Image: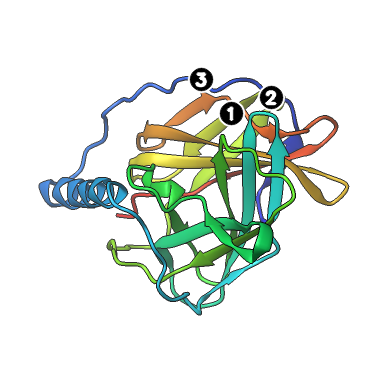
């Protein structure tokens, strides 16, 4: 279901990304972006619960990837509607022994995009990745996507964000739009033999208009001999 660039996988530890505040925008645009970022910060301070699923989003087959240092869950998503969907709440967890549901991202003070999908274009597919330092082995993962509570304004569709691998270890992320991005999530999934075998996530704090940054992402799993999917989803839309 993913439509992303694939490269040979190699890995390194996460590297810091500098925050550079640039870009010429109107006062109204600055205010709207500030309100959106502040609303997301406030939302991240409370728990996120999906009361009822959004029928416009189909959740594909999930993959649970476990390692000595934690667990990653890869969640393929499809937008079946003709509208752009943004700020979609998502709960993820595993079916523990006895059938009990163990939720992994219902705690307060998580990163906003650990509990929300930034955006999915009309009739498009994307991948969302959740990571935790909890070790979960023989468990079946689940995810539920709910209706958005925030509705950021959209102008001409989603801003274009390009992401690729440079030799696997370092990733390149480019904002090909005139809209600066904040708290940009970047997901990586290593695929071998048609199976997801490793995954990880990182955040670019700020990526200015037509800006490019490089970073490395540590992953959970066994990426040796795999190819790499890199997914970067825009967070600011106008």
Nearest the viewer among 110 and 150 is 110
Q: In the picture, which quadrant includes the C terminus?
A: bottom left
Q: Is residue 117 visible?
A: yes
User: Going by the image, does 206 lie left or right of 69?
Assistant: left
Q: In the picture, which quadrant includes the N terminus?
A: bottom right
The x, y position of residue 236, in whole percent, is: 34, 50
Sooner in the amino-acid sequence: mark 1 or mark 3: 3
Give the distance between the C-alpha atoms of the residues marked 3 and 2, in whole angstroms. Answer: 12 Å
The x, y position of residue 179, in whole percent, is: 33, 46
- SS at circle 2: loop
Q: Which residue is painted at 62% across and 35% down in the image?
A: 70
Task: Name the colour scheme.
Answer: rainbow
Give the distance between the C-alpha atoms of the residues marked 1 and 3, in whole angstroms. Answer: 7 Å
- SS at circle 3: loop
Q: Is residue 234 visible?
A: no
- Graded by Cα atoms within 10 Å as few (under 14), some (14 to 19) or many (20 or more), the crowding at tag 2 reads some
Q: Which residue is painted at 46% across and 50% down in the image?
A: 105
Give the distance between the C-alpha atoms of the residues marked 2 and 1, in whole angstroms. Answer: 7 Å
Residue 134 versus residue 55 in the image, above or below:
above
Asked whether the beta carbons under mark 2 and mark 1 sit within 8 Å of each other, the answer is yes
- Graded by Cα atoms within 10 Å as few (under 14), some (14 to 19) or many (20 or more), the crowding at tag 1 reads many
- Residue tagged 3: 15
Residue 6 versus residue 216 in the image, above or below:
below
The x, y position of residue 182, in whole percent, is: 34, 40
- Residue tagged 1: 217
- Residue tagged 2: 11
Q: What is the count of numbered marks?
A: 3
The x, y position of residue 91, in whole percent, is: 48, 59
């Amino acid at each position: 279901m993913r439509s992303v660039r694939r490269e040979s996988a190699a890995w390194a530890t996460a590297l810091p990304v500098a925050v550079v505040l640039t870009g010429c925008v109107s006062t109204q645009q600055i205010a709207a972006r500030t309100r959106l970022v502040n609303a997301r910060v406030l939302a991240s301070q409370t728990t996120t619960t999906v009361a009822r699923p959004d029928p416009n989003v189909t959740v594909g087959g999930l993959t649970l990837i476990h390692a000595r240092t934690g667990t990653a869950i890869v969640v393929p998503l499809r937008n079946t509607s003709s509208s752009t969907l943004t700020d979609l709440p998502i709960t993820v967890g595993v079916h523990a022994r006895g059938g009990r549901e163990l939720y992994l991202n219902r705690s307060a003070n998580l990163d906003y995009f650990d509990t929300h999908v930034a955006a999915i274009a009309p009739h498009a597919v994307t991948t969302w990745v959740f990571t935790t330092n909890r070790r979960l082995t023989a468990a079946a993962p689940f995810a539920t996507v709910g209706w958005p509570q925030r509705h950021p304004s959209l102008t001409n569709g989603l801003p274009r964000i390009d992401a690729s691998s440079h030799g696997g270890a370092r990733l390149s992320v480019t904002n090909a739009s005139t809209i600066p991005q904040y708290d940009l999530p970047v997901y990586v999934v290593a695929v071998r033999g048609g199976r997801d075998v490793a995954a990880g996530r990182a955040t670019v704090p700020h990526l200015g208009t037509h800006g490019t940054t490089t970073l490395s992402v540590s992953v959970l799993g066994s990426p040796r001999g795999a190819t790499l999917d890199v997914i970067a989803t825009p967070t600011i839309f106008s």
